Every structure is written in C-alpha cells, then in structure tokens.
Image (tube, rainbow, N blue to C red):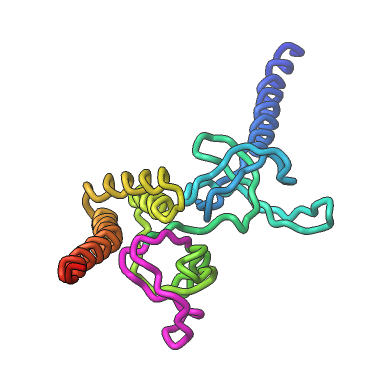
C-alpha cells in the first residue's frame, strides 16, 4: 500500500517541477510587443542604465520591442528605455526616442505639413529617395522623422502618400544617401568614392538608378562649366592679342 501511494505521488511531484520550470522560463522570455526601427545609427546597451555598449544599430535597422520602462539616472533625470532583441538574438536596451514604428522611402517629391491637413503650413517638400520614419498615424496621414533635409530639420511633420515601406529598397536608399554625403565632401578621395557609388547605382534600375543618373549628369555639367569658361577666356585673350596692332 505504501509503495502504491509513493507511485501515485511521483507524477504530481514531476508535474509540479515541470510547472515551476515553465513559469521560470516564462519570466525569462519576454513576448515581442512590436517591431521597431532605428531612426539613425545608434548604440544598444547591455543594461537599462545604458552604461555598457552591446551593439550599434544602422539607420533603419529593425529590432523586436520586448518592453518599455522608465528609469531614473544618477542625475535624477527620467528616461524611457526600451528592451529590444536584435536580429542575432542579443537582448539589450536603448532610449525609446531613438526608435520609430516604420521605415519609409519617398518615391516622389512629397509636401510635408505642420499638421495632418493640407490647410496647415507647408514645412518642406520631401525629395524623392529620402529615408524617413513613421512616428505616428492619423487617418491616411503619417507623422514622420527624417532629420536634416536641406536647410530644414524634419521632426513630427505630416505627409499623405508619396512613399513606400518596401524593406528591400532600404539598402539601396542608404547607399544613395551615403554617396550624396561623400560627393558633398571637401576631401577629394571621399568625392571620388561617392562618385563611384553613384555610378554603381546608376547602372541598376528603379528610382535610385534614375536619381543617380541625374546626379551624375548634374555633377558633370558643374565640372564642365568652369573649364568651358576658362577656355572661352583663353580664346578671347588670344583673339584680342592677335587684333592688337604691332608696336
């Protein structure tokens, strides 16, 4: 009888141990709340206090949001911090303000307004090919962050259409953005590198091939203009010298 009772108790002990193990596992593994995207190149840290570097996210790189919490720093400031999981499986922490809901690329020149109505102030026209991030939505309008666009800082402006959220286009968009930055550099080697990237893009197809071709054509005209001006000046000087009477 004692042996039978012992045998009956064993499954309950095993079940109890299994339940405890599952509960512990649930505490360790946080559920994915949403997909988020880095607004720019930014660090992820190992702890909520953001003291130890873990990894660096590239602009537009996606992470899984696991949870958000508010922490108080040593200087008594409060920060809203997101716990995220990277594509490689690492988990870390980043300030929530560095993340956006979605990455978009403008496929046409698109007006951005101060509020979600065309009756509000037009802030800037988003150039075709610009990378931006969705930080809010209202009806068929989206609120965006894009950083510096020309002379305007774009943050919390509203657009309606004119963009795509195709993740396949992001790699090409970043290459085009990098090439633009290099071409604008004061260093000759960086300008050369930017031109090479533009030529690589121009050899492809789609909107970034068109943008790269237009950029290269514009750059060629800019370079030719001073040379032509110098040639004309030299020709003019030669003609003037030829028409002068002999002394």
Q: Is residue 124 above or below residue 57?
A: below
Q: Locate residue 87, reporting x and y percent.
A: 49, 39
Q: Is residue 59 above or below residue 4?
A: below
The number of discs equals 0
Depth order, front residue of 11/168: 168
State the residue at coordinates (24%, 59%). Answer: 217
State the residue at coordinates (35%, 60%). Answer: 129
State the residue at coordinates (49%, 50%). Answer: 59
Residue 211 shows up from this direction: no
Considering the image in quadrants, where does the C terminus appear?
bottom left
Depth order, front residue of 241/2: 241
Q: Is residue 135 above or below residue 138?
A: above
Considering the image in quadrants, where does the N terminus appear?
top right
Depth order, front residue of 60/68: 60
Q: Is residue 142 left or right of residue 9?
A: left
Q: Is residue 120 left or right of residue 85?
A: left
Q: Based on the picture, tell me whether residue 63 belongs to the magenta stretch.
A: no
Q: In this view, which residue lies farthest toward the bottom?
A: 119
Q: Quadrant of residue 208?
A: bottom left
Q: Locate residue 121, reporting x and y percent.
A: 48, 84
Q: Quadrant of residue 141?
A: bottom left
Q: In this view, which residue lies farthest toward the top?
A: 3
Q: Based on the picture, tell me whether residue 114 belongs to the magenta stretch.
A: yes
State the residue at coordinates (76%, 53%). Answer: 71
Q: Is residue 197 left or right of residue 232?
A: right
Q: Locate residue 23, reporting x and y percent.
A: 67, 36
Residue 65 shows up from this direction: yes
Question: Which range of residues does the magenta coloring cover?
Answer: 106-133
Q: Is residue 140 left or right of residue 35?
A: left
Q: Locate residue 126, reporting x and y percent.
A: 40, 69
């Amino acid at each position: 009888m004692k042996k039978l009772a012992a045998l009956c108790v064993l499954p309950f002990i095993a079940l109890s141990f299994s339940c405890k193990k599952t509960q512990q596992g649930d505490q360790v593994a946080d559920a994915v709340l949403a997909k988020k995207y880095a607004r720019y190149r930014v660090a992820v840290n190992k702890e909520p206090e953001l003291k130890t570097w873990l990894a660096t996210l590239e602009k537009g790189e996606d992470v899984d949001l696991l949870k958000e919490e508010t922490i108080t720093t040593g200087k008594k400031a409060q920060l809203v911090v997101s716990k995220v999981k990277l594509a490689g499986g690492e988990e870390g922490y980043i300030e929530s303000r560095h993340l956006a809901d979605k990455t978009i690329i403008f496929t046409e020149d698109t007006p951005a307004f101060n509020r979600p109505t065309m009756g509000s102030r037009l802030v800037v026209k988003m150039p075709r090919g610009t990378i931006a991030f969705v930080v809010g939505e209202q009806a068929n309008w989206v609120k965006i962050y894009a950083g510096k666009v020309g002379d305007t800082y774009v943050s919390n402006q509203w657009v309606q259409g004119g963009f795509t959220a195709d993740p396949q286009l992001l790699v090409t968009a970043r290459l085009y953005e990098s090439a633009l930055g290099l071409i604008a550099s004061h260093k000759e080697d960086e300008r050369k590198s930017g031109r090479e990237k533009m030529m690589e893009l121009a050899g492809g197809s789609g909107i970034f091939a068109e943008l790269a071709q237009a950029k290269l054509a514009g750059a060629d005209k800019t370079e030719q203009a001073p040379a032509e001006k110098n040639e004309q000046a030299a020709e003019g000087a030669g003609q003037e010298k030829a028409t002068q009477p002999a002394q």
